[in-house]
Image: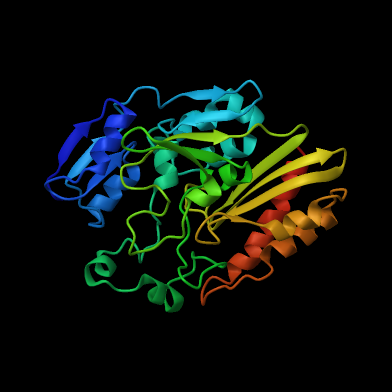
Amino acid sequence: MNTFEWVDATSVEQAADLLAARSANGAVVAKAGGIDLLDLMKEGIVRPGRIVNLKSIGGLDGIALGPEGGLTLGALVTLARIESAAEIRGRFPALAAAAAHASTPQVRNVATIGGNLLQRPRCWYFRSQLFHRDGANAGDAISDGENQYHAIFDNRETAMVHASTPATALVAYGAEVQLTAAGGQRRTVPLTDFLLPPDIKRDRDTVLAPGEVLTHVVVPAPAPNTRAAYHKQTERDSYDWPICDVAVVLQMDGETVAAASIVAGWVAPTPRRAVESERVLVGKPLTEELARAAAAAAVAGATPLSKNGYKVALMEAVVRRTIMAAASK
């Protein structure tokens, strides 16, 4: 591991200024919980000259419900707090469930929501130093190699998948992120626009610009009569990376679906909204048969790779089960 400078930032503005300036030793990176950063450094993918510690900044670890029921999460809120907070479990159950199923209890007590959204892919090709050192194309290796956990949609350019489980639920709820740049400039970006397909040649998979800090995640208030559910499918019942996860948010009018948001993670380079399934549901009474039709629509057009065709049937089953779970809330 290379030597680096450590700076405890005392404000968002100071952190943004530090991140915008180049260190004498090379790249400057931010650290929140540090779970992914430490992995990237040990694997030789990131070699920072300066690390800016965001945990020393006050005011970024709050959870607040707005007067209309919207939720604001400071970027330093841990996944464990999201999992256990009564106000989140009550109004945003799919988000609480997604946080509860992320990694292990030990990691959730340290990992932050901001860092979780900004983590790099867990693809073993991406994580290999050989691809970074030699400039090899991980996409070519994935298409003909060990691709059993990779994308089954939008996988022509890259088959790597986004590693965040909370992102699946946050996209379903229509979340936005708030960013602060050097000089104090601020902007708000929908999470669907914030996340980019992973690229081995790019040092981040978001629209976060150099010198910007993710400060808050904002989730709009659910509409009346909203029901939601989340399911993460793994190979083992104990801790494991997802094969597929699904978040479903339904607005009901009696037994009829008035609006729907269905999002699947770990099946595409970014969380994939199943708009085809939503069209099947909206305006109809929700039944098991309708859920099956919506699930079939969710996997239409999948383009599995040589070893991950099983994910098509698995995703269809998880979508159907999550729709019915949301309906029963």
Residue occupying the point 46% across, 60% down: 197
Please say which color scheme the image uses: rainbow
Tell me: 196 left or right of 66: left
Tell me: 143 left or right of 8: right
Figure check: 13 above or below 305:
above
Figure check: 47 above or below 255:
below
**Camera-side residue: 176 or 253?**
176
**Camera-side residue: 90 or 9?**
9
Residue occupying the point 40% across, 31% down: 76
Choose top left, top right, bottom left or bottom right for residue 181.
top left
**Camera-side residue: 267 or 217?**
217
Residue 33 coordinates in the image, percent (x, y): 34, 36
Residue 255 coordinates in the image, percent (x, y): 87, 42
Tell me: 279 left or right of 63: right
Choose top left, top right, bottom left or bottom right for residue 299.
bottom right
- Camera sees residue 291: no
Residue 142 coordinates in the image, percent (x, y): 42, 73
Residue 250 coordinates in the image, percent (x, y): 74, 43
Quadrant where the C terminus is found in the figure: top right
Residue occupying the point 59% across, 69% down: 310
- Camera sees residue 213: yes
Residue occupying the point 54% across, 62% down: 268
How many marks do you count on the picture?
0
